[in-house]
Amino acid sequence: MGIERVQCDYVSLVNVLSLCFACVVIFYDECVNLISVWKQDETFEIGKEKYHGQQYCHIYFARLHLMRTLLYSLAPHWKPNFPVCTVLELEEGKECVIVGTLYKHMKLKPRVLDEYSKQKSVVPLVKLHNFMHSDDYLVLEDESGRVKLNGNIIPPEYVTGIVVAVLGKESGAGDFLVQDVLDAGLPPQIEFPLKSGEDKYVVLVSGLSVGSSTSNPLQFQLLIDHITGHLGDEKAQRFASKIVQVVFAGNLVEIPHRILNGQNLASEDFARMSEPIRELDILLSQIAAGLPLDIMPGPSDPANFSLPQQSLHGCLFPGSSTYNTFRSCTNPHCFELDNVRFLGTSGQNVDDLDKYSDAKDKLEFMERTLRWRHLAPTAPNTLGCFPFTERDPFFIESCPHVYFVGNQDKFETRIIKGSEGQLVRLICVPKFSETGVAVMVSSKSCTLHFNLDMAFLYLSKYIIPLAHQ
Amino acid sequence: MSNASRKRAASAVAPQPPPPKQVLMTQEEDFMDEDVFIDQTLVSEDEESIILRDIEQRQALAARLSKWTRPPLSDDYVAQSRGVGAYFPLIGFPSSRLEIDYVIGESHRELLPNLSGPAAIIRIFGVTKEGHSVCCNVHGFEPYFYISCPPGMGPDDISHFHQALEGRMREANRNSNVGKFVRRIEMVQRRSIMYYQQSDSQPFLKIVVALPTMVASCRGILDRGIQLDGLGMKSFLTYESNVLFALRFMIDCNIVGGNWIEIPAGKYKKIVKSLSYCQLEFDCLYSDLISHAPEGEYSKMAPFRILSFDIECAGRKGHFPEPSHDPVIQIANLITLQGDDQPLIRNVMTLKSCSPIVGVDVMSFDTEREVLLAWRDFLREVDPDIIIGYNICKFDLPYLIERAANLKIAEFPILGRIRNSRVRVKDTTFSSRQYGTRESKEVTVEGRVQFDLLQKEDVHHSIISDLQNGTAETRRRLAVYCLKDAYLPQRLLDKLMFIYNYVEMARVTGVPISFLLSRGQSIKVLSQLLRKARQKNLVIPNVKQVGSEQGTFEGATVLEARAGFYEKPIATLDFASLYPSIMMAYNLCYCTLVTSEDARKLNIPSESLNRTPSGETFVKSNLQKGILPEILEELLTVRKRAKADLKEAKDPLERAVLDGRQLALKISANSVYGFTGATIGQLPCLEISSSVTSYGRQMIEHTKKLVEDKFTTLNGYEHNAEVIYGDTDSVMVQFGVSAVEQAMNLGREAAEYISGTFTKPIKLEFEKVYYPYLLISKKRYAGLFWTKPDKFDKMDTKGIETVRRDNCLLVKNLVNDCLHKILIDRDIPGAVQYVKNAISDLLRNRMDLSLLVITKGLTKTGDDYEVKAAHVELAERMRKRDAATAPNVGDRVPYVIIKGAKGAKAYEKSEDPIYVLENNIPIDAQYYLENQISKPILRIFEPILKNASRELLHGSHTRSISISTPSNSGLWKFAKKELTCIGCKAVLGWHWSTLEIEILVWFPVVLTGKQDSSDVSVHIAKEGKLSYIVKRYLEDKSHKTIGVVVVVSELEMHFGKLWTQCQECQGSLHQDILCTSRDCPIFYRRKKAQKEMSEAQSQLDRWSF
């Protein structure tokens, strides 16, 4: 019954919309200063990079090079009394610091080769969510060679692809006995804008999954109405009026991938496939009409597979893309809003860490990626990745103020602090279609006295009424 | 000068050793001794001192020697106050056939004061418990054989006979200066093993000769006949004259392969001037050896040192490395102690500098000479007992030796345990029933056993040279590869428990391990037969080999297979060890066989006789127990015990030993039958083998009859049982019941019932139920295998193409997946659909190329092949294209069959898969359909489907065909590629402005031969038309975008998976992947992914505007 009533409301709402529109415009007129300065980072655009048969060693090399310069500069302060050397220069019993890329040897890791070598098992394999095993071990590698790590380094915390410095010595058996590990730590942060200003909100949503069985168009419509200030009491509308940006962090739609699979498709198949996108376009254009809107592709979107995922093509959104507030972005996505730096992904990086390492919660994975200064260390090893040759776009050069990851199971947030006073708000954005939760981040810093809790004063959960019923 | 230096105690007696005689009867080459005189192969002492000086000069190596050597001898060994318990004959007789397992030297004066002149000295190499290497020179054992004593021969006659024989021997060996050829002739009481005889023994003459080769020459004389006083010309049948000297020694001393031998303190004399590199070397008398049966404490193995090594050679582009040109650039070595997990020593020797590798001792040298000599020194110091590697006997070892010869390093090939004895290489052919004829190189390394593991491919030779010519870093990479190749055989050896299985087999059959590696089955049986016969006072005649025409006999029959798909449980009744059981049950043996004539003559009561279905007569065991049944009984009892112990055993090492033992016992028991049937074997006796098979047939028929008579509705059973198939030793019965458990109960009942009707120990066992069961024809079937009623164990297939190498992977996958669907999923329509989809994919050019690759080894060059073969033709064509990457003799050539000109022969249509990938060459789908897929698939489906062929191979799914358009050949070269509009397929001329094209063209390049684009472009250029097209596209665009993006994302996913897998295999993240192994299942997929990624990106680029 509830649903029907709401649907009626919706129909009438659309009717009223044209009337209300004038109000909204006026409302925004009053708050002219709410227009924010938005700056996008182009790090994640493949752009001119061309694929010409290159392999993955280049990206590892670029990563090692960037990170090693950094770690070499840290090493003298960390362990002043020990020499720094390469894997080649190791000598038995000599204590020293070596820097290199970690490789985690994992017994249970699924391998393409198994498709060939393994006999078809009678019992279907249990699908594992995590491929760790007690026999896993770490190897440290630089261009000169690799060495097995032992001792004071715990494999479950690390994954393949991280660059770290380790102190220790080579044992007789050819292993390296680790005494201490150093990661690069949080990158330097641009200063948090101190000048007082209006309270501004950024809304983070992920996992709309339009077209999937869990998606509910009404739920989404209600969200839109909240964001655009068409629902709620005066207080809620006051909040809504302060929203300056909406970010959709991946999995906007869900396309039945199976029906594709390289087959020649009939035109009705195409129609079936693009149906969710048409629906999404209609909904998004409602937001784009009033608010700046960033959309990031996710694993289930019609985008390329490997990271960085390139922006969804504008032609998919013939309606909303006509607004200049509509911005199709890459995943990962990095932008600055009034000099507050946001960095986020649609979730693949953390999900992959979850498969190959262990942590108490998702936020800890996020924190680690910052400390490792690498957004997606498991790319390309277990996470699809474009074979870059000159650079590693996932290297985090500058510490964000807000770091979000989309398509998680539940909402979590925490502030972490770096050794140089960097403060980062970590946010796990839950799947909207399953939880009905969107996240609102306040970007206000009101006083000279810098206080991060104040700066991110308001983190609200929009619990859409339907979810309660 | 050189003559003077050759003078040595041992050589003084035989200054002119006769050349080895090759003129003896060639068909007996298989079992022939060859005398090698001790000084024949040695280098002079001058040279030796040069070698030693050489070592001293290389000080760098000297420091490592301490790490390499074996544990030092304890004082009581030095003082000889302690008995030597050494693990011996595993190392005893090196792996080749014509190896010196004994040498001819001067008789030992102290040990054998009564003898003088040359004598055979048996050399045994072994390891003690503590890991010391031992060389034991055994003296006093003399070669001999028997002849039956002519009746009425007295001591005087014997002495005349001796003289006559000695005279003939002297004639035959004129240039030999041996003092006395026939040492003595003794009268002994023995009995021939052939035929049942009533008397216990008869007089035989034991003829003892001076040297082992004289056995053969003496036998020749006696075979041909000898003039005897009073008897005239007389020829003799010899007995046990074809037993290898070494084996004779082992049998007479009760030594088996891989057992412990002890020489008590005080019984051995430390050698004054050692001839070997072993830590302990001594002389002793053969009668002082104590052999310990491999039980309890003595079943353990000695701590052998196992060397696993690999060499890399810098080949020239386009050539397989040849020792005359291409240097050896790296040698990687791993030394492992038997039973340890981790290697004791890891090192690599490189030509030119090489960056260090963690945990590996890297030794770099400036010249190849130093590399080779360093390896030789390493080998000598480390003193390995076993040498393993991939293809070492055929490639690595001969290459090293030939290379050293080319570089004129005369002192290199001293790799064995005998001081200054050069290693020899020869080409041999080895043929046995089991392995067929093989050509191989034979490298004799004295005192070290060589295990050759299977061949494999590695870095392409052309890349090796590039890496070698680079820097210390690139050479390090090569060294890492090389080390890996040295490590793999070691792991394989551990994994497959080779050592345990071989040692156990040697212990059971009593032959040295080297015999197991290089000889056929028959010597194992012969060894056991001789041992047993010796206990019984029996002697084995040396029957003239008559060749294979001696007559054939009917082999094992199988009951006719009633092909079909059985969806009810099929119970399988198996005869446990059928042939051995038959031989035991009916007392079939050489010594129980009686001719019917003899049976009459000897007046044997008919109740003591047994007539076999093939018409032979054997006596029953109350008159004479056969030797073969006795051997078999022992083998099977021991096996039973081993299996029982295995169940109890906890320790994995112990389990490995026991499992190896029971397997060895089973194989040995089964080979006894084969021995009697081998017409060119040592002691063929077709009377036995044909009786065995005839009994076997009878048993099967009997079982069938009993089952079908008893299990009927008339007898109160639910259904009539039906025997659907019977193989050599098993019968498949359909009892008609539909539950597995019921079938199992009935199976058990039938087995018990029928077993009761057989003579013991023949026993029918119920083991398993097949359900469902797909019976294709005889020896071809598949089914699910149940031993417990609740869950099946596995899918079992026999005779169905699942692993054959000359099939492409597609066939194997199809067959496996279909069987899986039919048997496990019980989804026949699904299987049919699956096959149809695969065929459709094949015809529509959507098949993964790697599934279509067929691989064959290139064994000879094109001219040598009589019939033209696809892979040979391809190799020839590739050589013309680019000699550098073309396959060489010894390589394996992968190819696919491509569409050729009409009427082209199959061998002309082979093509390199890489070339096909790169140039979009169309595959000959029809060939794959007809020549690869159809037969195996139809075989599976014919029992299941009506009209299988029409349904599967000619259905509607075969109508749609697409062919890729090649980019560089034939007519297509002249076709022009142009951008076309997806909407109306109009060709877009290049004169269009970029902007217009960007708006209009979103689809990939489609090739078209249509050239009349002018009117179309004019047509479209008109404003109204243009807007029409643009509009059409805007509607279509989002659909097409999704289509393209999804294809691309799939490609990216594959690309990532494949290339990171290769990084993993390579063991390095920061280096380019070099591997070009075409044996790797993902090689083509990886290449393809690389190519498609390029294409996909250019496609995507067309979308960005």
Image: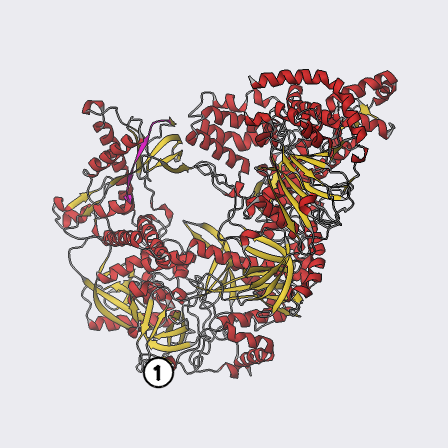
Residue B218: quarter of image: bottom left
Quarter of the image containing the N terminus of chain B? bottom right
Q: Where is residue B42 in the image (x, y as percent from the top left)?
A: 50, 75
Q: Position of residue A93 (x, y in %)?
A: 57, 70
Relative depth, front residue between B284 and A324:
A324
For the question of whether residue B553 can be seen, the reply is yes
Q: Is residue B753 left or right of residue B843?
A: left
Relative depth, front residue between B1007 and B515:
B1007
Q: In this view, does B141 lie to the left or right of B62?
A: left
**Residue at the (80%, 24%) spot, across then down:** B987
Question: Of the residues shown, which amino acid type is indicated by label 1?
Answer: Arg
Image height check: is A132 above or below B267? above
Residue B610: quarter of image: top left
SS at mark 1? loop
The image's colour scheme reads secondary structure
Quarter of the image containing the C terminus of chain B? top right
**Alpha-carbon neighbours of circle 1 within 10 Å: few (<14), some, or many (≥20)?**
few
Q: In this view, does B790 lie to the left or right of B471?
A: left
Q: Give the range drawn in magenta.
A: B566-578
Tell me, yes or no, whether the highlighted magenta stretch contains residue B569: yes
Image height check: is B982 above or below B463? above
Q: Is residue B929 left or right of residue B94?
A: right
Q: Which residue is denoted by mark 1 in the rendering? A: B109
